[in-house]
Amino acid sequence: MSKKIILFYPRIVTGWQAQVRLSLPMHFLCTATVLEHAGYEAKIIDQRVEPAWRSILLKELKKDPLCIIISSKTGTQLKHALEASKITKEQSNVLVVWGGAHPSLLPEQTLENKYIDIVIQGEGEETALDLVRALETKTPLKTVKGIWFKENGHIQHTGMRPFINLNQQFPFPSHLIDSKKYLRSMFNLGHLSFFTSRGCSNPCTFCYHNVIHRKTWRALDPDIAVQRIKDFVKTYNLQGITFSDINFFADINRARRILEGIIKENLNIIISKVTLSVNTLPKINKNDLELLERAGCRRICIGVESGSKRIQSLLKRPVHVPTLLEVNRNLKNSFILPVYFFIMGIPTETKEDLLESVSLSLKLLEENPNAVRVFNIFTPFPGTELFDLAVKHGLQVPKRLEDWISFNYRNCAKNAPWLSKEMRQLIEMIDFCNFFVGKRHYLKPYEKTNPLVVLLSNLYAPLARKRVEKLFYRFPVEVKLAKYFGLYAKQE
C-alpha cells in the first residue's frame, strides 16, 4: 500500500493582490515532518505559491495516497479548500481529511459536507500520524484520538487529544518546501516565519485561539528554542526571521533568555516581528527594550484593541494606558517600530467608544512618529464569547460549511445587525484611511516599486488624518472610486 500523504494548503484570498504577503505553512510543516520521520512520504501542495496546483494535485492523486489533508480557516480559504476536496472526490477514491482552525471550531458541521470524510480537531501532528497508520493497517478509526469521522451515516468523535510536547518536535527537513517562495523582504532582508510557542492563556473574548488551544500557552525551553532558531537560520540561509508566537513575552524570563541566546550565538539576524500582549507591558522595562534591539528586533506588535474602558472590559483586555504611552515614548529613538492593533465594530460599541480608540491611537503616533496604528474590523468567530454576544444582537449563524466562505471582516461589517448605518460608515472610512495615516502607513513599501502610488497617497494623507480625527465619514468620494477600480474592499 502507498505510504504517501498529500497536504494541501488553500489560498487565503481570491483575486489579484497588489502586495502578496506569505508566511510558511508552519503547522503543515510540523505535520509533514512527523510523517516523514515515521517513514511516510509527505507532499505539500501550497496553492498560494503553486500556479499549477490543479495539475500537481491530479498527478499526486494518481499515486493512490492514503489520504489528502486540507487545512482551512474561517472565510475565503474555505472556498479553495472545498474546490480541492471536490476535485479529489470526483477524480479519485482518496479520503479527504480536514484540519485547521475552522474544522476545529465546527467539526460536525464541517463533516456534513459530502466532500469531507474526517476532521482533525486541534493540533495535527500526532493525530495525523495515528490516523494514517490506522488507514494503512485498516485499524478502526475510533482508536485515533482527536478526530471526527462519518460511520454508517452518523458522525463520531473520538475525544480530545492531549497537547504535544513542543520540545520533542523534529526540525523541519529542508526538502519539504522551496523556502525561496516564502521569503518576505522586510527591512531590506529576506525573512521566514518561525514560532517558539503555541497558544495563549489570556481570557480575551474575541480570539479563536482560546478555543483551539483551550486557553493554554506552551513553549519551547529557551535553550532548545535558541538551538532551533540557529538551525533554522542555517538550514534556510536566512538573514531574518519573524516570530509568529501569539505572545512571545508570556514568560518574561524565558523571552529574555532566548534574546540573550540569539546575541550570544552571534546569529546576526534581523527579527522583523515580535508580538506582545498588552497586559505584559508593565513587566517590560527599558533594559528589555534594549535587549530586543541588541538581538536584532525591528518591530513589535501590540494588541491594544480599544481605548474605551467599557470595551476593554467586554474584551477582557485591560490596558494600562500610562504604561503603554511610556513604552511608546521609550521606543521613539529606538530602531524598533511599535505597531498597535485596534478592533472596531464590536457589538454594543458606540461612536464615543470608537472615538476613544481613535484618540488613543493618534496620541501614540504623536508621541512616537515611527509608530504604526492599525484598525481591524471585528469578526465574530464561533466558540468565542463575543460570537455568542453577536448572535444575541442578531447575527445569523451560517447553517452550512459553504455559507462561511463570505464570513470575512468586511462582509461582517457590512451585514452586522448590531451596527447602525452611521457606525458602518465610520468603520468603512477608518478602514480605508488606515492605509494613509501615520509616517509609516501601509503604502510605505511601494516607495521603490510604485512612486505614483506613493505620491498620490502622500497627497491624500492629510485629508485621511482629518477624516479619522473628526470621525468625518460623509461624502466618501475617494472610497467609492477605490472600490470602483477594484483597489479596496474586494472580498468574497
Image (cartoon, rainbow, N blue to C red):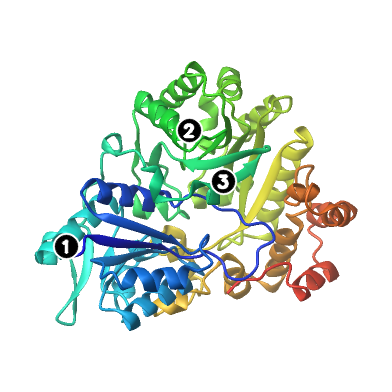
Q: What residue is drawn where x is 29% and y is 54%?
A: 124
Disc 1 packing (10 Å; few <14; some 14–19; many ≥20):
some
Image x and y of residue 219, in percent: 35, 35
Image quadrant of residue 473?
A: bottom right
Q: Nearer the viewer, mark 1 or mark 2?
A: 2
**What residue is disc 3 on?**
183
Looking at marks 1 and 3 on the same chain, the residue that comes earlier in the sequence is marked by 1
**What residue is disc 1 on?**
158
Q: Nearer the viewer, residue 102 or 182?
A: 182
Whether tag 3 and tag 2 are in contact, CB under 8 A, the answer is no
**What residue is disc 2 on?**
233
Image quadrant of residue 227?
A: top left
Up the image or down, 261 lies above or below 193; here it is above
C-alpha gap between disc 3 and disc 2: 12 Å
Image x and y of residue 186, in percent: 64, 41
Looking at marks 3 and 2 on the same chain, the residue that comes earlier in the sequence is marked by 3
Q: Which mark is residue 85?
A: none
Q: Nearer the viewer, mark 1 or mark 3?
A: 3
**The residue under label 1 is which amino acid type?**
Thr
Looking at marks 1 and 2 on the same chain, the residue that comes earlier in the sequence is marked by 1
Q: In what element is the residue under mark 3? A: loop
**The residue under label 3 is which amino acid type?**
Leu
Q: In what element is the residue under mark 1? A: loop
Q: Residue furthest right?
A: 459
C-alpha gap between disc 1 and disc 2: 39 Å
